[in-house]
Structure formats: structure tokens, C-alpha cells
Image: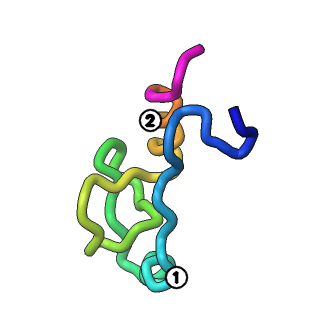
């Protein structure tokens, strides 16, 4: 296995510069789990998570060895 290959599959998509710039303009979307503000604008589609809930969700779905 190449050391640069991700262990659990493909890495998440990288946001474009315009999406990142839009993310720093408010108002921010609420996290669907804890209702805290996220790093995403309210116009984002899907189920945005705050950094804490995103980290916890990643821990739950991480590969077990």
C-alpha cells in the first residue's frame, strides 16, 4: 500500500475558493445535531455539522482494524 493512499477510501472533496469565501460570510447554518453554528452559510444544501459533531461522526464511522 502506498503511504499516500487514504486508509479508509477516498478523501473528502475539497471546497473551491468561492465556496470557502462564501463560508466566511454570515449567517451560518445550524448544526443538524446540536444546533450550534457551523462553518457553512445558511444556503448550503445537505445536513451541515459543526466541527465538534463532524469530528464525533467521523470517529463513529472510522475504519476499525
From the image, give the main secondary structure of the stretch colored magenta: loop
Asked if the residues shown at circle 2 and circle 1 are in contact, with their CB atoms under 8 angstroms apart, the answer is no
In what element is the residue under mark 2? helix
Q: Residue 50: x, y in percent?
A: 45, 52
Q: Is residue 33 left or right of residue 13?
A: left
In terms of image quadrants, where is residue 19?
A: bottom left
| Marks 2/1: CA–CA distance | 25 Å
Residue drawn where x is 25% and y is 57% of the image: 46
Q: Is residue 52 left or right of residue 28?
A: right
Residue beneath disc 2: 57
Q: Which mark is residue 17?
A: 1
Q: Residue 18: x, y in percent?
A: 45, 85
Q: Which residues are magenta?
A: 61-65
Residue drawn where x is 44% and y is 35% of the image: 57
Residue drawn where x is 44% and y is 28% of the image: 61
Compare residues 14 and 22 and report the one nearer the observer: 14
Amino acid at each position: 500500500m502506498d503511504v499516500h493512499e487514504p486508509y479508509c477510501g477516498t478523501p473528502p472533496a475539497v471546497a473551491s475558493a468561492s465556496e470557502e469565501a462564501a463560508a466566511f460570510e454570515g449567517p451560518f447554518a445550524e448544526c443538524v445535531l446540536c444546533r450550534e453554528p457551523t462553518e457553512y452559510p445558511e444556503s448550503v444544501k445537505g445536513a451541515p455539522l459543526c466541527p465538534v459533531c463532524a469530528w464525533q461522526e467521523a470517529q463513529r464511522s472510522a475504519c476499525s482494524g
